[in-house]
Image (cartoon, helix red, strand yellow):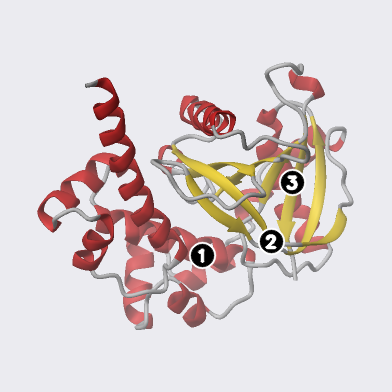
Amino acid sequence: MENHKSETQRIYLERINKVVSYINANLDENFDLEELAKRSNYSSFHFHRIMRGYLGEPLWCYITRVRLDTAAHLLRMTELPVNEIAQKVGYDIPSSFNKAFRKRFEVSPLQFRENRTSEFIIDIAHRNTRIMENLTLQPCIKELKDVQVIYTTAIGVYGDENTSRAWEQICTYAKEKRLFGFGTEFIGIGHDNPSITEPEKCRYDACITVKKVIEPEGNIGVKMIQGGKYAIFKLKGPYTLLADAYDYIFGKWVPENGIELGERPPFEKYLNSPDDTKPEKLETEIYVPIK
């Protein structure tokens, strides 16, 4: 009976993960909820209830929020025209995008872009002072190849118990499947900016690199982290310093050096483990996509 229950839960999570991964990777598509239900192999009647229970909000609200939060990130971090950003997140009609954006953020997309540095101005000198001794202020620039990872997603405040649980799940899975090997890397991807997205709704992927061909299973997904040119910063110290590090990178290093950012999400590579390393000795590489 217990095995049957575990198998049922595995299939349930696999179906949900399949839909969520598809949505996150195709925000420019005109989603049809009936078609999404078919992807999950659930009837549309059950599909909406299942997705709402998992996401904590109706599916269409999730799609709209992720689209607009992604647009806000692109407005803040790139110089892409507003209409092009709108199309990238699934809005073919600019007026519809402007209306939806204003409803979520209470300002127009252009106003949001004009005010994009405001979050860094307040107390930036203090935050920079805190991070100076822990972060390499000039990064190493490298061209990276695509890398395959297995991952599981946590939704919630970065670094909370959901993040820890995601790492426990992905590491247990990798151990059971004998996926650990020479050169295995541990990577974290934060898809949302807590200054844009409500912290309790932020998406974080706990990833482990794998070399063999493997299929998704349950809430364990498989994807490629896109290669390209990255600026790599090294941080030494507790993970609580990561927010300050990102503030320095995006609030000071990027504008002062005239950096044009890539559209890929930044990610973190953890060089040692908090299980056997003191917080002040932890080492993290921050990979920032650039053009």
* Disc 1 crowd, CA 10 A, few/some/many (<14, 14-19, 20+): some
Q: Is residue 96 left or right of residue 230?
A: left
* Callout in the foreground (1, 2): 2
Give the residue type that dot 3 points to: Ile
User: Upstream in the sequence, badge 1 or badge 2?
Assistant: 1
Give the residue type that dot 1 points to: Phe
Q: Which residue is mark 2?
A: 146
Tell me if residue 14 can be seen: yes
CA separation in Å, label 2 and label 3: 17 Å
The residue shown at (41%, 63%) is 67
The residue shown at (76%, 16%) is 278
Tell me the element at label 3: strand
Locate residue 21: give its quadrant. bottom left
Tell me the element at label 2: loop
Q: Which residue is mark 1?
A: 112
Nearer to the camera, 131 or 242? 242
